[in-house]
Image (cartoon, rainbow, N blue to C red):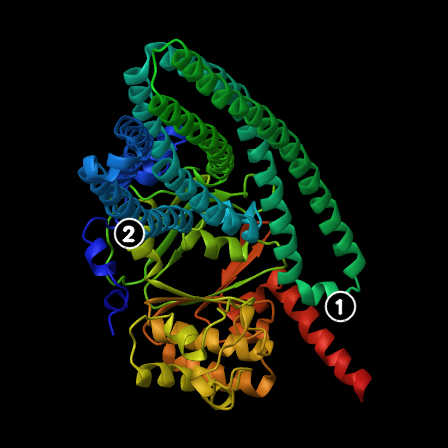
Amino acid sequence: MNKEASIPFAKFWSRFANPFHRVDSPPPVGLYRFYLWCLKGAFPVIALGCAASMVAGILEAYSALLLGWVVDHALASGREFFFEQNLWLLLGALVFFLALRPLAFGISSMISSTLVTPNVTAQVLSRLHRHTLEQSVSFFDEDFAGRIAQKQLQTSRAVTDTVVEFVNVVSFAVASLLGSAALLVSIDTRIAIMLAVWLVIYGGLIRWFLPRIRSRSGARAHARSTLSGQIVDTVTNIRTVKLFAHSRFEDRAAIDALEIFRHKALEFGQIASAFRFALMAASGLLPVALTGGALLLWSQGVASAGDIVATGAVSLRISQMSGWVSFTLMAVYSNIGESEDGMRTLAVEHRLPDRADAIELQRAAGRIEFTDVSFAYGRRKGGVEQIDLLIEPGEHVGLVGHSGAGKSTLAALLMRLYDPSVGTIFLDGFDLRTLSQESLRRQISMVTQETAMFNRSAYENIAYGRPGASTDDVVKAAKKAMAHDFISGLQDPHGRTGYDAYLGERGARLSGGQRQRIALARAVLKDAPILILDEATSALDSTVETSIQSALRHVTTGRTVIAIAHRLSTILQMDRIIVLQDGRIVEQGTHDELLSQGGAFAKHWDQQIGGFIGMNADES
């Protein structure tokens, strides 16, 4: 069933706004322009909400005028003839209070709650999330995952709340004040002048307090997101916490972050309390001044009793509304502060943007060339240096070397997770920087040592390699990766079984070998012309590894394969082995050629084989 059809008015309202409309420009740094970027396309909806709120505000102001007319006519007619002489006035008042006024407020509320709020929330969050997803890997490497997610949710909520409060309160209050001012002018200009003087005092308090509220709210939001990031980081790595018996250490880290948040929250609370006291004092001054002025004019025969009632009603209403508005403005400025804090984190230019004329590469042949490539992750040392390497289509190449030699760095550069600081990488003759990143990564399947699992079903995790794949294709891929049998026996805490069973966060319900087999099945299903295996069978036992190696030989036929390995036995069948040392290529050739050279590979081989023989001898 269509989800929109099940929600009254949803399909109707969706015609007014498309909250998922893509904005090609990045979010600007600058609060005013950032808000414009977030809300672009929603302004007609916001304007409609403001107009409905202002109509309700004007009617609210003139309810006092209507009350004053009733009082004046009652005094003029006397008790005996009041209802007889004022029937139409009373009927008009009934229509106003029982129909017109409720209708105006109802329409305003309906527009705000069914059109403005859900659409603005969806629009802002989708734009921030889309921009964040397109950031480079280094953006995520430098921050907490929980903090980034918190910033997205915090900023979208803050921007939405700012808009909703402006529509519901600020527009309403402005219209009410304008209507009230016009009403007081009709009674006596001097009372209207008193209102103007009070508004200057009220505005001065607002101007002094709100910037301070904004800055302290931003500091509080920053502390909150840091606290959230700390907690998420601990929970995400809870196995490590337990294994090292560091619960107290993590508790201390959380308390330190919580103490900073508490301190910032107290600072915000202090300025908020002072603001409330000042505004309540100012609000109490207004009815005293306006009602007292109206009484003085009545004593001089200038104003009627109805004018006193109308002035008193208006002054009390404005007094009450000023407190309401002040709290709303405090919330608005708090939200602005939180939006500003989120903007500093999220409104960051993409470090690896696609070119405007980026090429959408179709299925590649798989010819890879590194030309004088150097990259050090922004450090002076590390990474790779002056790499010249040509891999022909369909060639199977092994990369070996000690940890930190640069093997995984080459794979990351080929995936364009980073751009080399020097040199160029080509795929089928195209500079990687001229290709769209999405089309480039569609050409490459990669299975890493630390496999990534979503907390979704086994089926969804495998189908992630090719969204929309049929069930038969998913099962075939699982069988090739030797994963079908254990998947068939899965069951999660909610009773889902087999391919429908959820794997837990980061695949927590699976062993390391099972996670790698699902990752292999995902890569098999993707069917990309280039396959990168980064210690892809390291978590498997020897029997399963032998079976998968056999299956991989069929899968890798006709594909360019780059296998990164510490266990040299896994790359014996490679067409060529590249030996890396300190980020440079020091040797390359077949297994037999490298052994005969007696160089770095031969020494590494002797260490592994010698250690294996020695271990077996000890066991004997």
Quadrant housing residue 506 = bottom right
Where's residue 156, x and y in %? 42, 45
Which quadrant holds the C terminus? bottom right
**Between 493 and 570, which is closer to the camera in this rendering?**
493
Query: For the residues carrying marks 1 and 2, which lies nearer the camera in this image?
Result: 2
**Residue type of the residue flagged with mark 1:** Leu
**Residue 72 relative to residue 499: left or right:** left
Which residue lies under the disc numbered 1?
Answer: 243
- Residue in the picture at 29% in, 49% down: 106
Q: Can see residue 30? A: no
Label whose residue precedes the other's in the sequence (1 or 2): 2
Which residue lies under the disc numbered 2?
Answer: 20
Q: Is residue 501 above or below residue 603?
A: below
- Residue in the picture at 74% in, 45% down: 256
Q: Secondary structure at mark 2?
A: loop
Q: Secondary structure at mark 1?
A: helix
Quadrant housing residue 248 = bottom right
Can you name the residue that lies furthest to the front here?
80
- Disc 2 crowd rating (10 Å Cα; few below 14, some 14-19, many 20+) is some
- Residue in the picture at 33% in, 46% down: 120
- Disc 1 crowd rating (10 Å Cα; few below 14, some 14-19, many 20+) is few
Which quadrant holds the N terminus? bottom left
